[in-house]
Image: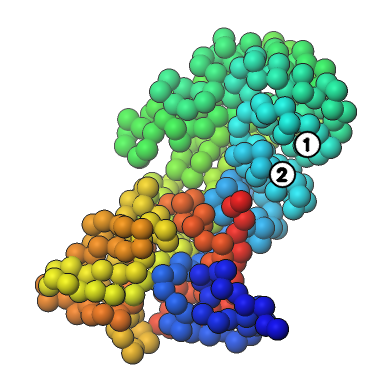
Amino acid sequence: MRERMDQYKAVPLGFDSAEVADLPRTRPLLRDFPTPIVTLSESAVAHNLATMANWCAEAGVELAPHGKTTMSRELWQRQLDAGAWGITVATPWQASVALGWDVPRVLLANALVQPAALRALAPDLGRLTVWADSPRAVEIMTEALTDAEPSAPLAVLVELGGAGGRTGARGQEAALAVAAAIAASPVLRLAGVAGYEGALAHDASPESLARVQGYLEELLALHDAIDAAGLYPPGGPVILTAGGSAYFDQVAEVLAPRRTAGGDGGRTVEVLLRSGAYITHDDGFYRSITPLRRGGDGREFRAAIHGWATVVSRPEPGLVLVDAGKRDLPYDEGLPIPQAIRRFGESVAVPLEDAVVTALNDQHAFVRVPEDAAAAVGDVIRFGLSHPCTTFDKWRALAVVDDALAEEPRVIGLLETTFG
């Protein structure tokens, strides 16, 4: 009996597991796949992996990319193979997935204050680092782990926040109290300082860049104060980490000077970025804010994710309805962007000018077009997308194409995701 693959909306109807496994050899045309569909462009992913690895090496920082972006074992492994220090996650469940996938170092960018989760993860604490922003969080971790026989002390970073931001101790005095509590715990190890500047700004205006700069300088000052107070354990490595995908250039500029390799009795200080969206980039939010566009050296990331949808209705001269909506495409950081159209029965997509998505329903997108636009029922529109983090979680598998911008993209594989 054939094992059908109907559980994946990214494969043709009736496909079986053997046909999916054979995609790298058969390389069918994307136009033979159903819509709605989101594709992952292999050429762009490979370019982005190499570009980020080279940038980090030149900047003198390490990378622990945020795995929640893709929740893909294959992409995580490719990031590790490209030199990533480890993988960042956001929840205890994600940490469990990463540890189960044998990720060598897992950074949980959050407080771990669920006693049952602490006890469950206790056998793997040697590979796990977490955050804390209050003495109460330290108390909960200490109580839960004291009788759990952990494999090693749990490495904990002091999280510094900012006014109006997200989590994180507010101010150096409060953060130092957290550091002192961690240092005093018999089952925890004070392992450094962490923060997230992306919660403090959302654009690249001079005001936003200045706010990020000031916050990062406070983060560095906290590390220096902890060191001066003698709270770090002697000889142990220390982590300084910040950096989403919007301001990692500023993170490197401020924190990289503290990086040391140890040796001669000195302490190793590792500076970690946690950028995750770079691996696929996008045509929306991250395209507008990425530091590479501010760098001016000609380097850039390439958008690797695209949506494809079929025109199912043209009820008015200036309105087109396609078969992709909120269940398929991201919309929290900007609506999808019409880029090109493939006419019914044709093989090559051509630019779609002056079209804009105005709204999404669950399974439809409203596309406004010029009244004389050549868009008819059965045509397929390619969309640029904004925000990979809310793209991947809508798909248990994405069709991998050789190059989404090729005249005739070919499907070369299926990328599975794990979102629980």
Q: Residues within 10 Å of mark 2 (few under 14, many from 20)?
A: some
- Determine which residue is flagged by label 1: 120
Judge from the rendering whether residue 291 lies leftward or rightward of residue 251; answer left or right.
Answer: left
Q: Is residue 45 above or below residue 28?
A: above
Q: Which mark is residue 268?
A: none
- On the rendered structure, is 233 left or right of 353? right
Q: Nearer the viewer, residue 219 or 34?
A: 34
Query: For this view, does 330 lie left or right of residue 420?
Result: left
Q: Is residue 259 above or below residue 22?
A: above
> Could you tell me residue 210's position as x and y percent?
38, 29
Residue 371 lies, in percent from the top left, at 11, 72
Whether residues under marks 1 and 2 lie with C-beta atoms below 8 angstroms apart, the answer is yes
Front residue (pair 382, 197): 382
Label 1 is placed on what type of residue?
Ala
User: In this rendering, would 242 be left or right of 289?
Assistant: right
Residue corresponding to mark 2: 96
The answer for how far apart the CA atoms under marks 1 and 2 are is 9 Å
Q: Relative to 333, say whether 255 is above or below.
A: above
Residue at image coords 63%, 24%: 132
Q: Secondary structure at mark 1?
A: helix
The answer to which of 395 and 241 lies nearer the viewer is 395
| N-terminal-most mark, 1 or 2 | 2
Q: Position of residue 309 (x, y in %)?
A: 36, 71
- Image quadrant holding the N terminus, namely bottom right
Q: Which residue occupies 43% across, 82% down?
A: 31
